Image (cartoon, rainbow, N blue to C red):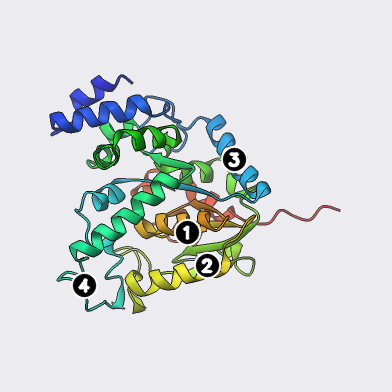
Amino acid sequence: MAIDTVLDALPSVTPEDRASLRSAYQAAPPSIRHSAFRWASVDAVDPAALTRLERGILQALSDGSGFSLLRLGDGEALFLAGERPCLGGATSNGRQVDPRLHAGAHLPPDLHDLLANRFLQAIEAADAVGVPDLSQCLQGPKHYSLVMTILWRLLPAERQAALAPRLLPGGCHLHLYWLASGAYERPPFLNVHGVIAPQLPPNLAGRVNWQPIPGEKGHHGDAPGPAHYPVVYNETLAWIDHQAGPGRLFLVGAGILGKIYCDAIRERGGVAIDVGSVMDLCGGLSTSRGEFRLNPFLQPLAARAFRQPPATA
């Protein structure tokens, strides 16, 4: 799809943002999705792109080298733009909210800037970063175009050039593409060391180390203890210090803060995959994302994900 054709159709795009989007999508690789599919289609992906990513994960596990794969959507973009000072609800999804936060459980400006910089560091250090493609910007949630806009607004030219080859346009739904393709029933996803998520899929119970976190505000009940940030956030970073290491695969479904967890795992030589709401669906919660309603056939696939294959004679 021609860049200018999409930019002409996007509502309320300023000339400055238009220039950022054109520059970003010209620098990024082609979309891993086939064109002319709706924004949430999980059958639009090029299977070869998934295979390349799976091989990269296996290679990192074999080499003992750090690796992280992140996905960015509208929530992450709004946080980087300073419009989600509640961390997408992570400051208030528990019974105990930190009294140092501002009214509405919002991060004070200095703390917001500190976390946003750490988040941006995680993006720049990642081995692969799934972002919406142009077709999704046109069809999907209204803030999808902000993902690439805000990255190019925040990064100087040399850092844009360094990040661009690792961007995966169309990859914001990678976790669902893998589910639809049955990838979670084969390597590398059968040898998971750790999970960071509100729910643990039953097929992983007793087989992995699990760091539970409070669930996403509005989709899970409030945790009986503290909210995700800052107490559980700091506990989770300490857990990563103890658990992460070369050759260990981690699945992370932890919202905005999950990107920082993925980078912390990568820094310690582990392999971190941002699987997001797949952890919800595989744990039996099918109401947390509109994509689940648009692709109801994912639910039985989620029930099979991560199960161990039968032993061969």
Q: Which residue is mark 4?
A: 101
Which of disc 3 and disc 2 is earlier in sequence?
3
* Kind of residue indicated by mark 2: Asp
Of residues 265 and 216, the one drawn nearer to the viewer in this rendering:
265
**Residue ID at (13%, 34%):** 12
Residue furthest to the front in view is 158
Front label number (2 vs 3): 2
Quadrant containing the N terminus in the rendered view = top left
Left or right of 120? Residue 113 is left
Which of disc 1 and disc 2 is earlier in sequence?
2
Instruction: Kindly check if marks 1 and 3 are in contact, taking CB atoms under 8 A apart as contact.
Output: no
Which of disc 3 and disc 1 is earlier in sequence?
3
Picture coordinates of residue 210, whole percent (x, y): 54, 68
* Kind of residue indicated by mark 3: Gly
How far separated are the C-alphas under marks 4 and 2?
26 Å
* Kind of residue indicated by mark 1: Ala
Q: Quadrant of residue 249?
A: bottom right
Q: Is residue 193 visible?
A: yes
Looking at the rendered structure, the secondary structure element under dot 4 is loop
Picture coordinates of residue 162, whole percent (x, y): 41, 35
Q: Which residue is mark 3?
A: 56
Left or right of 168? Residue 26 is left
Q: Which residue is mark 1?
A: 264
Left or right of 270? Residue 278 is left
Q: Which residue is mark 2?
A: 241
